[in-house]
Image (spheres, rainbow, N blue to C red):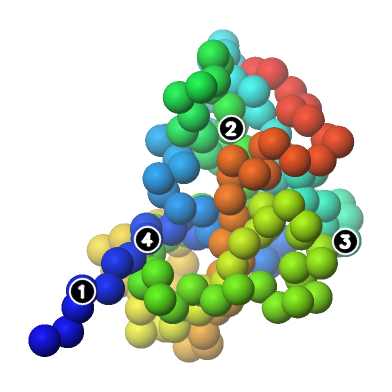
Amino acid sequence: MTEKVDDIQVLVFNIMGVKLGVDTEQVYGMRDHLHAEGEDLKIARFHEKIPFRITPVIYRSPKILLIRDDAASSGSGIIVDEPEDIVSIPIDSIRPLPPLLELLCPSRQIWGTAIRSHADLSPKVSIGERGSEKDEIILLVDFYRLLNYGTKEVIKTV
């Protein structure tokens, strides 16, 4: 008899062609950044928390992912680009970062990798485009560590 493998649900998004994912347990909602006026939210742009070497970073379809945090008096959010899918990733398929990347992320905001094959894409969960026959590497991000690390704090209160 085989034992059931636990999965995590990961929301996949894109920043300048890099596929990233966050455990959906850390996110309680999504807002269009243009319609967040008047909400008591502390907002940070993803690329300012983890700098990208490509500049300028262009957001084609920006969304605010609202961070689940019971301790916060006001909500926090991260602006990401092109949210695509919610995918189920078996925990035993998650791999650690290569040592070189680990050195670049000492606080472990990016904590692991997952590979998503074309065969894993379910038409029931997609909110983005399809068509690639290649496997995709998804870098797994911890939003709690992301918000609490570095000198760049929240850049804007909406």
Q: Are marks 2 and 1 in contact (CB under 8 Å)?
A: no
Mark 3 vs 2, N-terminal side: 3
Residue labelled with disc 3:
53
Mark with earlier residue (4, 3): 4
Q: Pick whichever, 144 or 14, lies toward us.
A: 144
**For the residues bearing labels 1 and 3, Cβ distance under 8 angstroms:** no
Image point (66%, 73%), residue name: 97
Question: Is 32 placed left or right of 92 in the picture?
Answer: right
Identify the residue at horizontal 52%, vertical 87% (top origin).
134
Count of marks overlaid on the render: 4
Number of the front mark, 4 or 3: 4
Q: CA distance from mark 4 to mark 3?
A: 30 Å
Q: Can you see residue 34? A: no
Q: Which amino acid type is shown beneath numbered disc 4?
A: Ile
> The residue under label 1 is which amino acid type?
Lys
Tag 4 near tag 3, CB within 8 Å: no
Residue at 82% over, 67% down: 103
Cα distance in 3D space between marks 2 and 1: 34 Å
Specify the quadrant that holds the C terminus. Answer: top right
**Residue 5, picture quadrant:** bottom left
Amino acid type for the residue under numbered disc 3 = Arg
> Marks 3/2: CA distance?
23 Å
Name the element at disc 2: strand
x, y percent for residue 146 = 67, 44
The one of 66 and 146 positioned closer to us in this rendering: 146
